Amino acid sequence: MATPMPARRDCNAPTFDSAKPHELCRYFANIKFLFDRAAVSDSSEKKKHATRFLVVEDQETWETLPVFTNITKMYDQFKTDVLKLYSGNDEERCFGVSNLDALLGHYSRTGIYSKADLTTFYRQFLRITTYLISKARISAPEQSRAFLGAMQPASLLTKVEQYLQIKKPDIHPEDPYKIIDIYYAAHFVLAGSIVVGHVCTPAGHIPDEKHVAKIVNWGPCKDLSELCTFLGTIRIIRIFIRNFSIAHTPLSSSHAKRCHCDLAPCRSQLKKT
């Protein structure tokens, strides 16, 4: 038994927003699904159904087309003429190399500083380049080199290349990496990793904030055990403490003599870095 076509504001009714013209093909695909389910075959009926789900402005525009009122014109011709009214719906010209250049230019200026930036760029890049490859307008190696080159700022690109050289040692320097490998490398670098109290970021190593907070807020050491714990903590991030050896010497002496020690010099040097 055929299912009737939905009403205009029915929850199952398809919608189209002219502010998003690239979604028009999906709208027609949804309409076709409803035609098949409702067993609608007459071209005139299909035209009427196709326009009645639209907002008033778009409905009036579609219905002014000569092909809409001409009963000798088939629905497919009507659909073709409607698609011409909106950009981004030419199956042969959905994307061009200029779209790719614009995307790469944007991220070369703004950079990729987080996993959110990376995933957003990756989705847009795949959408454009996969289409261009299918139309033989760019090659897979060009896709790979473009994606790797988009890893900006330069510090991010350097770390991604270093990661790939370690993970993929058999890849010749002149051969392209798989795009998925580049993506995983960038994802790893941007995620940041803790290595002995250091956080690895595209900008370089920075001290782990947990260790910094412990040192800055450390109270007076009341016994040898507490002093040993403090010395072990500051040694983990000693490369970030200016004049570490100068600040550390009195503490070591206090450790050896088992006497009261002042932690202020070490804390103050950390705050200055």
Image: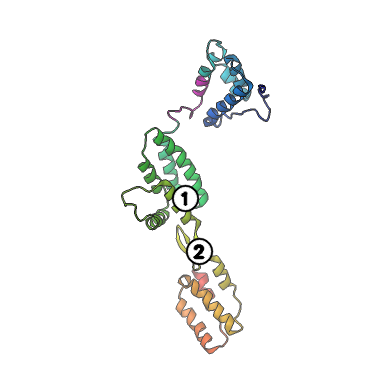
Q: Provide the residue span drawn in magenta.
A: 79-93
Q: Amino acid at mark 1?
A: Ile
- Which SS does the magenta portion mostly show? loop
Nearest to the observer: residue 173 or residue 111: 173
The residue lying at 56 percent from left, 73 percent from top is 215
Mark 1, secondary structure of its residue: loop
Q: Is residue 151 visible?
A: no
Position of residue 167 relative to residue 196, above or below, is above
The colour mode here is rainbow
The residue lying at 59 percent from left, 14 percent from top is 44
Q: Position of residue 253 (x, y in %)?
A: 50, 86
Q: Position of residue 248 (x, y in %)?
A: 49, 80
Q: Position of residue 163 (x, y in %)?
A: 41, 57
Q: Is 219 left or right of 85, judged from the image as shown?
A: right
Q: Is 71 left or right of 158, judged from the image as shown?
A: right
Residue 141 is a magenta residue: no
The tag on residue 112 is 1
